Image (cartoon, helix red, strand yellow):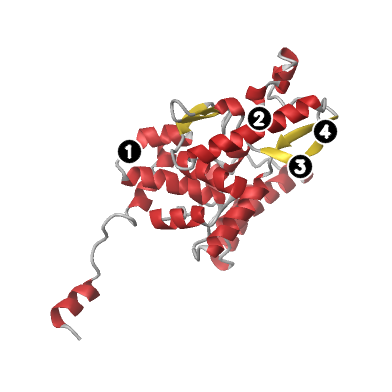
Amino acid sequence: MESQVVRDYLAHLAVRQRVSASTQNQAFCAILFLCREVLGLNLESVSPGVKAKRGERLPVVLSMPETLALLSAMSGTPSLMAALICGGGLRVSECCELRMKDIDFDQGLVFVRSGKGDKDRSTLLAEFRREELRAHLRESEAQHQADRQAGLAGVWMPDALDRKYPNAGRELGWFWVFPSRTLSTDPRAGVVRRHHVSDSVIQKAVKAAAQEARIHKPVSVHTLRHSFATHLLLNGVDIRQIQEYLGHANVETTMIYTHVVKEFRNPARSPLDIIYKRTGP
């Protein structure tokens, strides 16, 4: 009886109110909480299938000329970050959290440590702006030396490495590729140290560059990651290899870019153009 009430209410939301799937699922969770925790009703018979399913949405992707236009409209540190993301398919947090030891110029690779799902992986380091990146790393090294001379605490270390290797946070290899200009107090350790740059820095820079380049798509930093995968597919890279570069747990997640690629390959010609060419004005 109780489960039928839940189903009827969700049907009311979905059919009569025409609300989104996320709103339906939010209402579903609220009802379950009310029934279980407040009213003490047993709703074990309510199937997870009651939850609304979202329709598939294709990611926003930049064409190659749009990508170059966006990067050309950027400068400074955000420009280098955008180039790394677009050249290697990094997530914004993965780019911000890069350490000096994660950049391998000899192999042309970027190593992502403890990415989504706590997984390590390697991806591509583009030759584009590589010399600018080398110069930036020299500036980061100078910042590291200045911090050491100032007696600052080492950078934050993941997991239990700070206890296992107490001096590692002061080593150059663990220093941030993109360190913050300001110091902050680490609430976990209660010490003043230098953190990496905030992701809002590049988010704002990409938004501004998209406007300057007159790109009218809803561009975000994650759009560069989508573009990386799509452009690899267009150039014939195997879908499994792209999956590894992106760090997807399942190839099904990567397969969505096969649908996007159709928009960039030679599309069918509009029948209106065919008619116009044959008959003329």
Camera-side mark, 4 or 2: 2
Where is residue 104 shown, x and y percent of the image? Answer: 50, 27
Q: Earlier in the sequence, mark 2 or mark 1?
A: 2
- The Cα atoms of the two marked residues, 3 and 4, are separated by 34 Å
- The Cα atoms of the two marked residues, 4 and 1, are separated by 44 Å
The residue positioned 71% from the left and 33% from the top of the image is: 143
Q: Are marks 2 and 1 in contact (CB under 8 Å)?
A: no
The residue positioned 47% from the left and 37% from the top of the image is: 246
Amino acid type for the residue under numbered disc 2: Glu
Q: Which mark is residue 185?
A: none
**Which residue in the structure is indicated by mark 1?**
237
Q: Earlier in the sequence, mark 3 or mark 4?
A: 3
Where is residue 58 shown, x and y percent of the image? Answer: 44, 54
Q: Earlier in the sequence, mark 3 or mark 2?
A: 3
Seen in the picture, residue 249 relative to 47 is either above or below; the reply is above
The residue positioned 73% from the left and 22% from the top of the image is: 170
**Which residue in the structure is indicated by mark 4?**
187
Query: As drawn, which residue projects farthest toward the bottom?
Result: 281
Amino acid type for the residue under numbered disc 3: Glu
Q: Considering the numbered disc 4 on the image, is that residue within a helix, a strand or a loop?
A: loop
Amino acid type for the residue under numbered disc 4: Pro
Q: Earlier in the sequence, mark 3 or mark 1?
A: 3
